[in-house]
Amino acid sequence: MADRGGDIPFAAKLQGEAVTATRSRPARRERRPPGREGWAMGTSAHAGAVPNAAFRRLRGRLSPGEFAAAVRKAARQIGEQVSCDARYVGRVEAGEIRCPNYAYERVFLHMYPGLTLADLGFTARETVRGGRRARRPPAEPAPSAGPAPGGSLADFAEEQAGAGAKGPVREPVGRGATSAGVGHGEKETDVLRRVFMTNGSAAVAAVSLGLGSGAGAGPGPGSAPRPEGPPALPGVLPGQRRFGEPEVSAVEEAVRRIRLLDDRHGADGLYRRAARPLRAAYALLDSGVSARRGAVDRLHSGAGELALSVGWLAHDSARFDDARSHYAEALATARVAGDPALEAHAFSNTSFLARDAGRHREAVRSAQAGLLAARDLGSWRLLSLLSLREAGGWAGLGDRAECERALTRAHGHFGRGASDADPEWMSFFGLPELEALEAQCWAALGEWARAARHARRAAALQGRGFTRNLALYRAELAVDLAHGGVPDEAAAAGHRVLDLLGGVQSSRVLALLRTTATALGPYRTAPGVPEFLARHGEAVRGEAVRGV
């Protein structure tokens, strides 16, 4: 199989491209908290794990970060979206990930055409999953909300992450229901959503604390006594719990799962349930102890990122007070842990929320604080995003000159390219998002034609993997066209948004559609407008029936 950029196989280009990427990325200060050295080098955290020597040989002389960047690039080439970083590469090489999930499988087989998963050093999926099922009691009527008896929590989390193998799972009619006849990718997403809602990462994080499915509730009347936990560490007080790799990995996996589902389906159906692993993570921070400093650092970072993810779900579903609280919690966690990357992320989200809430001066100051926190992290893309946040605040204040200066800085940073230092959470930030955020700036300044040009580019560049973002960009385009006096094109853009609503639940998208319908009111006789208004009305009634 040839790389799309030419006839040279993808695997043969990795070494040369890594050299180019290394030369072009900004210098960054190495931050390796105590206790993380073994993790960064890919040593196994599980005593029974067998290192994957074949995968390590394929990496060659590339660093784990360089190889992760190559994996992300290969994913984009085939329309996949994976959040691969050096830590993931280390886990594979250490043998902790015995079989990749389906997205990673497609990417790896694209990178190494002609090889099988076995050639890459992985274990057959049937063997991995079958071995775990054999440990469950055979009479169990449904998947357990916790790990199988005798299996580790990490095994359970890995099994849930690969649950897409079973084919389509139909959800009950109502919130989150999808139409029949969806393609393979949508079926897999449907399974993933069901797993998360019922017994996925939320349950994993809860089980880590011994909380069961309640994730924060104490034992109810008549409930069975909780099993005794592992022996306490020396100095552990009564009521404290010991945590390690399985619990920390569960929190990190919850963050990834929430982001994936939000990217594809929007926030409305996720927010309440996503709060459960967040409560579990902070309860673990408050009452847990670990023998390793590295685990404590990772739990702080993971809990902070989880707070930001849950806060974003609240933000996107118009629960601004809840979002503000979650973002503040994440910022406090970053300050306590001395984590500038988490701090920059928290300021980015806070700036975005302030802009949406009409607090434009706060949006500017939060973005500037984020830029200060991010200055030594070595990520040009992060600096670009924060500059765009600042530009949005200036646009809300009506300051065109400052907005244009911030936009110029954003484009300059973005033009310096991706880097190994780019945070995992920024997987959404590419050229489509850059265009969309610039479109929002021009819309805030009342330059609708210019806003529409950028929104149109964003929608055209966005792949279908980020369904929620595609719906958002099209909805913003519809608003810009309606305000710009192009009703027929606005109606057409609105129809394309409605086409995606079956798989997307986002209050933000619905609000933009309402704005479009209102703006098109005076153009009821224009071509295509009556049909859009009628269809939009039906969609609004349908959402009201489902309670969205």
Image (spheres, rainbow, N blue to C red):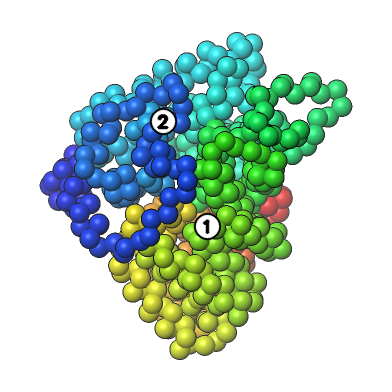
Q: Residue flagged by tag 2: what amino acid is it? A: Ser
The residue lying at 50 percent from left, 51 percent from top is 263
Identity of the residue furthest to the left in this view: 7
Against 461, residue 443 (above or below) is below
* Foreground pick, 252 / 169: 252
Disc 2 is placed on an element classified as loop
Judge left or right: residue 545 versus residue 335.
right
Q: CA distance from mark 2 to mark 1?
A: 25 Å
Residue 454 picture location, percent across and down: 40, 73
Against 153, residue 452 (above or below) is below
Q: Which mark is residue 53?
A: none
Judge left or right: residue 511 versus residue 190.
right
Against 23, residue 389 (above or below) is below
Identity of the residue furthest to the right in this view: 221
Residue 52 visible in the shown view: yes
- Residue for badge 2: 44
Residue 466 picture location, percent across and down: 45, 52
